Image (spheres, helix red, strand yellow):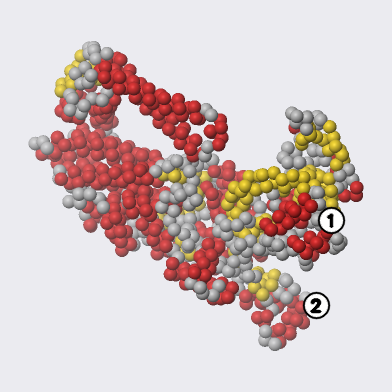
Amino acid sequence: MLDKTYDAAAVEPKIATRWAEADAFAAGAGAKPGADSFAIVIPPPNVTGSLHMGHALNNTLQDILVRYQRMRGRDVLWQPGMDHAGIATQMVVERQLAQRQEPSRHDLGRDKFIERVWNWKDESGGMIFNQLKRLGASCDWSRERFTMDEGLSKAVLEVFVSLYKEGLIYKDKRLVNWDPKLLTAISDLEVEQVEVQGHLWHFRYPLADGLTYEHPFALDEEGNRCAWKPSMGEPAGHETRDYLVVATTRPETMLGDTGIAVHPDDPRYTSLIGKHVELPLVGRRIPIVADEYPDMEAGTGAVKMTPAHDFNDFDVGKRHNLKAINVLTTDARVVLKDNEDFLDGLSIEGKLIEVIEEIDGMDRFAARKEIVAKMEEGGLLEKIEPHTHMVPHGDRGGVPIEPFLTDQWYVNAAELAKPAIESVREGRTNFVPKTWEKTYFEWMENIQPWCISRQLWWGHQIPAWYGPDGQVFVEKDEETALEAAIQHYIAHEGPWKAWVEEKLENFKPGEILTRDEDVLDTWFSSALWPFSTLGWPDETPELKRYYQTDVLVTGFDIIFFWVARMMMMGLHFMDEEPFHTVYVHALVRDKNGAKMSKSKGNVIDPLELIDEYGADALRFTLAIMAAQGRDVKLDPSRIAGYRNFGTKLWNATRFADMNGAVLDPAFDPDAVKLTINRWILTELTRTATEVREAIEGYRFNEASATLYRFVWNQVCDWYLELLKPVFNGEDEAAKAEARACAAHVLAQSVKLLHPFMPFMTEELWTHMAGEGAGLACHAEWPEPVFADAAAADEINWLVDLVSGLRSVRAEMNVPPSAQAPLVLVGANATTRERVVRHDPAIKRLARVTDILVEGDAPRGSAQIVVGEATACLPLGDLIDLEAEKARLQKAEAKVSADIAKIEGKLGNEKFVANAKPEIVEAEREKLVDLHGQRDKLEAAIARLADAG
């Protein structure tokens, strides 16, 4: 006999141990002979990571797919692994060194520091894998990979060297996102936009060569001059100016300005295109260029160009051959002295000497204040405006990032993207939901060179070595690079030939080359994940068997950073897409729809939810809320509700046990005679079909809802309830059939539920089928074919009738103990026969005294339509009609008042514009709920009116 209550805290570890001891999730475990493969690669979590709600959703959905396919007998591999997380891991270990007051990274040196990182990884890294096991993730844990392990490092070397030799990896000087605290380039995904209350400084840049022009102005309501814009029509007048006004949020970058851009159609500045201004404080002549980039309606329409410190300016600068002058160091200090690019062409005299002496070496924000003060002192500060704007910050370093001009390694992503675009366009890889294909195409068709180098120590060190003259040699190891270098220098006459020969003669070949100190972007190794984890570049059996993988389950935020790059690399090196389907799930938000963040204090810890409700309840909640394209609004109370769903199944199994239901391997659905059993077997077939179609269509919410409806409503609430008279009756044949059928249906329900709630179902399966029957995770997926439409129609009619009568009683506030006759009007012969057959059940379940068939509905009755007949429940004997009418009208008035209040809020444009989006959405949802309440109340009032 099952325990009285299901204890998730006790059962889940026991089941996890049973799976582990059986090696239940090994590749191919439970597969039928000759079965097709089914493979998923896990999005590798960071080695520093801990399970969050995004992981919980992502891995729950993957596990549903994997368990489903495993039960269908496919040869399944769910490939696990972790990402080495370059920046995050290096920061964790550096912080640990500081806390322990041990030597710093730089004091240790590169080799010793990397050794410490590996030690940390072995001791503390990978905690998330144990957490995923608690969630029930059925990966082949014996195949765990790590992006820095020997095999994956070999794959990284192979790809880098191959792409370099094909001309698809190269070194270039371009702008990157630079973190001045961590002193490394970072990816766009590692940049977060932070709203800052800043300023917009308007500076006057004097026109060169004594030039003036006529600048248009408008007049405000009081007749004062104000800014004129082209959209305002004719200006009120013109004033002579010998300067241009530009606005900036970063005055410190003006020292690197090399141009002013205006729109070619802007009438204010057409006469100035091709002319010059003199850069204040510096004295450099910089051109005024015409470009489509400036917005004529924004600011003054004239935009200062700092190509070395702004991504848009960099692009404009390339179009107009503007010089890129970097005026900041890697740690964001102003550098002017010994800055050849800055000093080129300048006369070092007067004001410039003072500027260099005072500002050189200043922190960027201190320099900002000093520059503004000097501009004001020189009469060149037009005005300062408060300005709220988004400032990019490094998500790890926490400081504003700088667009920084530096030498980095790049991948020619535009070339690699071409086949990846065609794969999706031609349907070889499909996105679900399909709407994400548009995002994919927008990114891929406008792709920029991919910066793959990082100024870190932890990661894949770039396999590039430099000769004494800076010549680069890219090979898989230093020995091969040295051979290439010697051949190169010996073959070319010049000073370096003799230098190399001298090193060789003195047995110092190690001094010829210097290795590039940078490491590769973490996303580089992740891009190889679908084939490198299977053993590539070696031709392994796993690679042959499981590549192409089947589906990638991922969040939308990494479609570009990871999905697109896996597509590019997979097609280039494997000549086949890495997966045929990309399922993109939405975000998990809090119950109000707000994004979870530590600063808001609304982060929900999945491990705490597992502790409180069990992993099954969390998984089922996430699955049933995972509608395609819709964010999951997670309310812990919903998890409690789905824990109750598990409890319902547990109790139903105990009830069946107590009534002698035992699984019979010889049970034959086609031999069943009782209508109630033929009905539930028909519904089981419908449910299994709907669940299969929903899972295979990635409609996890529909699959979950179908199972919930079947198990809770049809099996527990109706089937077992309707079997009670059979269990308690004298007909032994009927009793035996009911016991066997109930056990069969519960066992099939357990198997259908297994991918969603694996722990409880594994425990129930062991109880039902016995230890010798094997594990539920290897049990055969139910594919019933039994169908009896007549039996289904008959019992569904009974369910509809009783449910309708119960609803009327609830709406009318009828006391549970009150009973009344049921009058059927317009009933045909079939309905009359059903009434006779199910008379005891109707009376017991609907609390009816008698069932009468009449020609007309009695006065004072509530009426519901069931099929062709009308079921009438006389209310006069059950309730005080007038008192109930007053109660309902009072409730309806309150709901209507609440509706009016919320409609007033939502009709207020200021509220909608200024309130947080999640608050507005919550109000809208509340309004929908209130309308539903009012509809029910109005229906109940109408019933009373009809009854009166």
Element type at marker 2?
loop
Q: Is residue 413 left or right of residue 498?
A: left
Element type at marker 1?
loop
Three-letter amino acid code of the residue under disc 1: Gly
The quarter of the picture where the C terminus appears is: top left
Q: Residue furthest left?
A: 730
Q: Nearer the viewer, residue 225 or 489?
A: 225
10 Å neighbourhood of mark 2: few (<14), some, or many (≥20)? few
Residue in the image at 44% along x and 33% along y: 925
Q: Nearer the viewer, residue 806 or 666?
A: 806
Q: Residue 740 location, x and y as percent?
A: 18, 43
Dot 1 or dot 2, earlier in sequence = 1
Residue identified by numbered label 1? 283
Q: Residue 184 location, x and y as percent?
A: 62, 63
Residue identified by numbered label 2? 494
Q: How many numbered marks, from 0 up?
A: 2
